[in-house]
Image: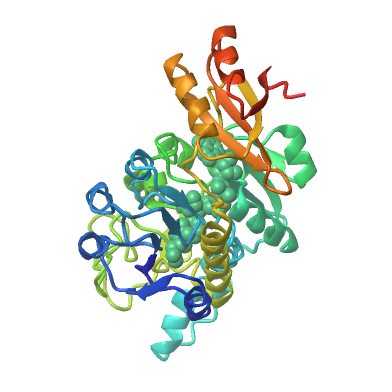
Amino acid sequence: MRLLIADKLHPRAVEELSALPIEVIYEPDLTKESLEERIAGVGVLVVRSTPVTAAALEKAKTLHLIVRAGAEYQTIDVRAASRRGIYVANCPGKNAAAVAELVMGLLIAVDRRVVDAVTSLRNGQWRRGEYSKAEGLLGKTIGIAGMGAVGREVAHRAKAFGLTVAGFSRSLTPMKAAELGVVHAHSLEDLASKSHILTLHLPITERTRHIVGKRVFAALPPRAIFINAARADLVDQAAMREAVVTRGLRVGLDVYPDEPRDKLEYASDLFGPQTPGAEASGTWSPSDSEGFIYGTPHIAAATDQSQLAVATETVRVIRSFLLEGHVPNVVNVTTTSIANFQVVIRMQDKIGTFANVLSVLKRHGINVEEVTNSVFEGGGASCAKLRVVSRPSEMCLQEIRAFDEVLHVDVVTLPNLA
Ligand SMILES: NC(=O)C1=CN([C@@H]2O[C@H](COP(=O)(O)OP(=O)(O)OC[C@H]3O[C@@H](n4cnc5c(N)ncnc54)[C@H](O)[C@@H]3O)[C@@H](O)[C@H]2O)C=CC1
Ligand SMILES: O=C(O)CCC(=O)C(=O)O
């Protein structure tokens, strides 16, 4: 089988994958288009940001598994993969600490205007008075939207800075919030109204797209700090820029709506003055009462520690798939079965017995949803458990029992498997 790594992956992982019984092809510069040309004949695919499209999957006749070496997997057409029975797995939480570290970095950088202070020093200036007006973090409240892997790492670090932590998240109940030591918010606006700093750690879904708009920015106090190291499309960009102008919002970003994929240039007016008509110049820096936007080029997850943790998890997923037939972290296998009954069949472990049982079920119009089969020591007998939607009729069961090789047949109503 062939394994294609279509993005940069930590060299230690590439080395470990090369020790597995699989041919490893490392092509970190593949793009959406060139992947379509290279995917034929591949059994396992590893990607970070290279998109995996339905068109590519059309050509992926031998593909079994796609591993996204990262947290989210919206760059993969998961529906198209599911239609073709291809597993998609990710590496949840493995880069969370790195993202949280950058969030804290952006937070302090914004509060202390570190970037402008450095730029000013680089220009031979000593503007100590101007850069001595930070508000400080101690005693403020940070609102964390999305209390998953990254959100919790941010909470942990924020507490060490003496910040009060408030949280809003889909499954965060007041009781769970109390357990985590965070103030519970029942909505994003409620969270914003409780916070001096708002940081986003939500995934992008149909529900969360543009979830942060005018009302959320209006609920934040003037001169609030807003951090987005999750996804740009969570935010109404125009509303964010307006809040910079009208409410002195101070922003730290790691993600952008128009991130360049294969270029080194990024022409953007985001980092200059936001006031309409104001001229940007190389030496422009915001006044101490003005809102502004700082940014990093989508590097939150890009620490050596994080890349190694993600790569190690990628190897674990692939090794488990190859050696045990099990896919950890799979995201596209249904977890809610429509089966209502389990047919338990003990039988002699002989060629054709199982096929005979299946042909009887087929004749009686019964579709099998899930199957497990255990072989007993010595290899003489096996026990198959077939999950089905409708209860097989007595006649159907009698036909199965009639096979000489079938030792016992039982039907159990799910979920009572006793
Ligand atoms: N800048 C970067 O390099 C990185 C960015 N990210 C981004 O950060 C996001 C968060 O990452 P993780 O914490 O690892 O994900 P996660 O899945 O562990 O946490 C997401 C949290 O959001 C909550 N949530 C989901 N939908 C919601 C909704 N509609 N309303 C309220 N809460 C909702 C979930 O319950 C969960 O607690 C990722 O989805 C990804 O977009 C992640 C890693 C690196
Ligand atoms: O550095 C990367 O691979 C991107 C990380 C990221 O945004 C994610 O894991 O969702």
Q: Is residue 32 left or right of residue 209?
A: left
Q: Is residue 213 left or right of residue 305?
A: left
In the rendered image, residue 85, in percent from the top left (x then y), is placed at: 39, 43
- Image quadrant where residue 291 sits: bottom left
Q: Residue at horizontal 49%, vertical 73%?
A: 17
Point out the image quarter for the C terminus: top right
Q: Is residue 406 above or below residue 165?
A: above
Of residues 352 and 368, the one nearer the viewer is 352
In the rendered image, residue 89, in percent from the top left (x then y), is placed at: 49, 52
How many numbered tags mark residues here?
Answer: 0
Of residues 206 and 134, the one nearer the viewer is 206
Q: Is residue 289 above or below residue 180?
A: below
Q: Is residue 171 left or right of residue 81?
A: right
In the rendered image, residue 177, in percent from the top left (x then y), is placed at: 73, 40
Q: Is residue 125 above or below residue 286?
A: below
Can residue 142 be seen here? Answer: yes
Can residue 253 be seen here? Answer: no
Q: Residue at horizontal 20%, vertical 63%?
A: 37
Q: Is residue 271 above or below residue 18?
A: above
The residue furthest front is 404
Point out the image quarter for the N terminus: bottom left
Of residues 309 and 210, the one nearer the viewer is 309
Q: Residue at horizontal 35%, vertical 57%?
A: 256
- Image quadrant where residue 163 sits: bottom right
Task: Check the image and tell me how it is coloured.
Answer: rainbow
The residue furthest bottom is 124
